[in-house]
Image (cartoon, grey):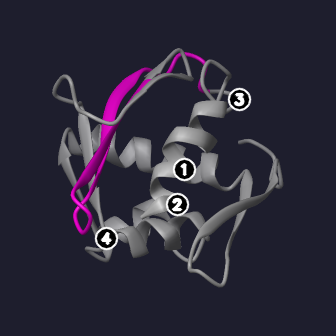
């Protein structure tokens, strides 16, 4: 899925080394997102509230691993469902530290809520607006 690769290699890479959310300046975690239907995994390192690494391969065991299918990830980006709702509806799974996973799911929801995405006629997801909601 091209939009998945673009999300990590273009959109998130542009956010590297900048504060993701006000109020989370001290937040640090290694996590990964595994796409169960396309057999791809992305590893993300957050240090002091900033993405400091995005890797297509997992070089070390993450604190948290989210397992999700591409359509569910797209629904999260489109705000049809929150990361937390996806977990409780069993549309995604969390491996590793469950407490940190739930905390990170909420942080990711705040992060995603800053941006507006759309789906085009080819079923691709695109960023169309940013900073649409204030940070918490």
How far apart in space, not on screen, are marks 4 and 1 (Cα)? 24 Å
Structural distance between the alpha carbons of marks 4 and 2? 25 Å
Please check the rendered image and state whether residue 35 is part of the magenta-colored stretch, yes or no. Answer: yes
Q: Which residue is disc 3 drawn over?
A: 22
Q: Residue at x 58, y 71 (%)?
A: 124
Mark positioned earlier in the residue sequence (4 or 1): 1
Q: Which mark is residue 3?
A: 2
Q: Relative to residue 108, is residue 70 drawn left or right?
A: left
Q: Quadrant of the N terminus?
A: bottom left
Query: What residue is shown at x 52% (from left), y 39% (from top)?
Result: 9
Q: Are marks 3 and 2 in contact (CB under 8 Å)?
A: no
In the image, which is nearer the foreground, mark 4 or mark 1?
Answer: 1
Q: Is residue 36 magenta?
A: yes
- Helix or strand or loop: what does disc 3 sit on? loop
Disc 2 element: helix
Q: Are marks 3 and 4 in contact (CB under 8 Å)?
A: no
Query: What is the CA distance from the residue labelled 2 to the residue labelled 1?
Result: 6 Å
Question: On the rendered image, what quadrant is the C terminus found in?
Answer: top right
- Which class describes the residues within 10 Å of circle 4: few (<14), some (14-19), or many (20+)? few
Q: Which residue is mark 1?
A: 7
């Amino acid at each position: 899925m091209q939009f998945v690769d673009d999300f990590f290699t273009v959109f998130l890479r542009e956010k590297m080394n900048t504060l993701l959310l006000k109020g989370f300046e001290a937040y640090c975690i290694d996590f990964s997102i595994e796409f169960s239907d396309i057999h791809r995994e992305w590893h993300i390192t957050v240090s002091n509230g900033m993405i400091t690494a995005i890797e297509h391969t997992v070089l070390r065991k993450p604190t948290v691993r989210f397992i999700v299918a591409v359509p569910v990830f797209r629904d999260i980006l489109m705000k049809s469902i929150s990361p937390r709702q996806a977990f409780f509806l069993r549309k995604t799974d969390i491996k590793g530290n469950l407490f940190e996973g739930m905390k990170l799911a909420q942080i990711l929801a705040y992060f995603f809520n800053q941006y507006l995405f759309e789906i085009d006629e080819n079923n691709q997801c695109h960023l169309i607006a940013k900073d649409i909601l204030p940070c918490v």
